[in-house]
Image (cartoon, grey):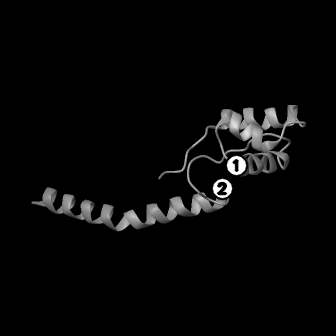
Amino acid sequence: MTKPVFDDEFKQGVVDYVNQHPEESKISIAKKFGIADSTIHKWVRAASKNGNKIESRGSGNFSSDDAKEIARLRKELKNTPDALEVLKKAIGILGK
């Protein structure tokens, strides 16, 4: 089973709703939006650290922008030998 993905606009809407309705429990809000109450707690906590705004780093499950960049560079480095072999073969073919 795959984990559902929610866009930032939806997350921000839920966080705003929670902030505008402090009398309503997070469990009832979760049922209203069809998500887990733990998800609401996570989004509200994250937003409270950022001026009540949802912050998105983009796709991937990285702990920081630096971790995402490191993963990208590792992937690029891993593909470098393959690209080098293709270039060597191309030069060999052109040299004939």
Q: Residue at x 66, y 60 (%)?
A: 63
Residue type at mark 1 is Thr
Q: Name, please, the residue furthest toward the right.
A: 23
86, 26: nearer the viewer: 26
| Image depth: mark 2 or mark 1 in front | 1
Residue 39: which numbered mark, if any?
Answer: 1
Q: Is residue 93 left or right of residue 49?
A: left
Q: Which residue is mark 2?
A: 65
Q: Residues within 10 Å of mark 2 (few under 14, many from 20)?
A: few
Q: Position of residue 33 (x, y in %)?
A: 68, 35
Instruction: Determine the secondary structure under disc 1.
Output: helix
Above or below, 38 against 77 in this view is: above
> Which mark sits nearer the N-terminus, 2 or 1?
1
Q: Residue at x 89, y 37 (%)?
A: 22
Q: CA distance from mark 2 to mark 1?
A: 22 Å
Q: Position of residue 9 (x, y in %)?
A: 67, 33
Q: Residue at x 58, y 58 (%)?
A: 69
Q: Is residue 15 left or right of residue 88?
A: right
Q: Residues within 10 Å of mark 1 (few under 14, many from 20)?
A: few
Number of numbered labels in the structure image = 2
Q: Position of residue 72 (x, y in %)?
A: 52, 58
